[in-house]
Amino acid sequence: MQTKSMYQKLHPLAHDAVSWSDGFWGRLHKLCHETVLPSMRKALDEPANGAVFSNFYIAAGLQEGERKGTMWSDGDCYKYMEAWAHIYGQTKDPAILEHLDPLIAVIAAAQEADGYISAPMQLSPNKQRWTSVNDHELYNMGHLLTAAAVHHRITSKSNFLDIAIKLADYLYDLFMPRPPELAHFGFNPSNTMGAVDLYRATGDGRYLELAQRFVDMRGSQPGGGDQNQALVPLREETWAVGHAVTAGYLYCGATDVVAETGDEALLAGLHRIWDNAIHSKMYITGGTSAQHHGASQRPEFGGSAGSVHEAFGYEYSLPNATAYNETCANIANAMWNWRLLNLSGDAKYTDIVELVLYNSMLSSMSLDGIEFCYTNPLRWYGAEHPLLSQDAYERWFISRCYCCPTNTARTIALLHNWFYGVSDEGFWVHLYGSNSVDTTLADGSAFALTQQTDYPWDGRIRITVDAAPADEVALMLRIPGWCDGAALRINGEASEMPLAPGTYVELTRAWNRGDVIELSLPLAPRTIKAHPKAEEIRNHVAIMRGPIVYCLEGMDLPDGVSILEVYAPDDMPLEAKMESELLGGVVTIAGQARRLYEENGATALYLEAGREQEEALDIRLIPYYAWNNRGVDEMTVWLPRRF
């Protein structure tokens, strides 16, 4: 069963309500089906990869061998399976079920009689259950619960769901007594989302109770730290702290609990955290983890919050070349904002979702869908760049930590679920891309439309009503926060409705089949600056067009010119151009910058100012998500201003 979350304002459509047509995300969805996931399956069979399916076969007694990969390998395999389930919901390709069913059978055979399953632990004879948060048991289990719930919702099959129920019953018996020694589990809390997903799939209230227990455990006992948000109870928190993936997953799970319970104190804590994260710790690309390694800023605890890694940084500390911005953290940021959107209907959350999707999520995958990266810095010094944890000069096919590829794949696979919503007020259009919708409204009446657009390259969006009830229906169209000067026409006539950036415009009328809505979102390039407290990017600018952040790559500069010599005049004209043969077809932005360089290539740490050579320099900027697809070279998002 699929319960309707009582405290959500908006509700997603059925899994098969949206069908992709050709367009930006439609092509990516097809790539995911035909290339990304088949290639990923090969990677998940590579013994040197961080995530492998072989552990399940060994734990099930179906083959011999030793544990491979990381302690969180299972969870990444489950994300892969979840992605296939979403693709099946769109395509009904029977080969997908033929692929998943044997994997599910192996997982069932690997599960212990009491419901426990975490294959890396089961294959580690020197380890005991629930003795270290770093064993990632709940991370693995949470992704199983979610993947099984999704699989059941889309296929109506119970083979995967039965495993999840058996596991959740085990977890319920273990955690509901609230043993203090388990207060700081799990380190990476996909388990809270998974418990709510299973509650929604089954209607069994125990699983919602379990999710609430997972939330209440955080910060409830001494000994916790900021690394996994275990120092301060979530309802009392004011900062976004620690590991940015564990944080994002925790905030997602807590928001799911709010959607089912209406917990006002919990929601208030989440709002405080959101304000801190988005307004002082988020990159222009939607990335959220500034620090590879660092320390948490907790003066009220005398520094006892401890060291952190892969983490939120200090307020306004947003370094470029050393930015971590783990792909999973960026995606978790979008996942959380999508949940907050459904609670409130506030377009500010949709803006963040869109920002991540087109930038810091998509930048993780090569254009051919085969190779990936873990970190997403905003400046790169080419082959001379010093590599920090998880950095790489080029994207890779396999990695010792393989969480990001499977997360990227499942996000692309499920994205049709994020485009629209239904509320008691009407039908909501969150994101723009070519597709068709056939659904029902809150009162059960049929509603269908077709969206045609070349967004994000072209801001013209055409929506045709294909079916509607006789009564009036409110249609809510999002006007992005970055968009000034939007225009709207209905059946060829200009609308007088106010189109304020960062809102949903409400169009209420009795719609007829064939009605046409034309929304125009101007996509002029915009020059963006940062808050003056952001020291690393003070007196710098970045270029955006629509939701897309742009960057400068070294191969688009003349030989011998470095990105470090490029300055952006305040009056630099910018010209957008579609280049269909470049990087899979992108809009580039051209401008005339200034080159400032030292005579004779002087490289001293300190030099007397005002003696630089200066000349005009034509530059071409590309979308940030497409960088590092033409070989290793320099790259920067931010350019220093030339006043």
Image (cartoon, rainbow, N blue to C red):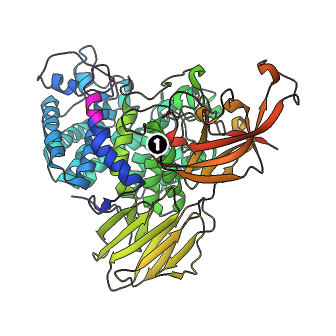
Residue at 48% across / 59% down in the picture?
455
Is residue 505 placed above or below 636 in the rendered structure? below
Residue at 57% across / 30% down in the picture?
291
Q: Does 88 sit left or right of 335 as displayed? A: left
Of the 4 image quadrants, the one containing the C terminus is top right
Of residue 589 and residue 363, the one placed in the foreground of this image is 589
**Residue beneath disc 1:** 361
Of the 4 image quadrants, the one containing the N terminus is bottom left
**Badge 1 amino acid:** Met
Q: Residues within 10 Å of mark 1 (few under 14, many from 20)?
A: many
Q: Position of residue 136 (x, y in %)?
A: 34, 28
Residue at 36% across / 57% down in the picture?
22
Of helix, strand and loop, which one carries label 1? helix
Is residue 384 placed above or below 492 in the rendered structure? above
Q: Does 98 sit left or right of 639 as displayed? A: left
Q: Position of residue 83 (x, y in %)?
A: 29, 44
Of residue 128 and residue 513, the one placed in the foreground of this image is 513
Q: Position of residue 611 (x, y in %)?
A: 88, 28
Q: Does 601 sit left or right of 42 as displayed? A: right
* Residue 42 falls within the magenta-colored stretch: yes
| Quadrant in the picture for residue 317 | top right
Residue extent of the magenta highlight: 39-50
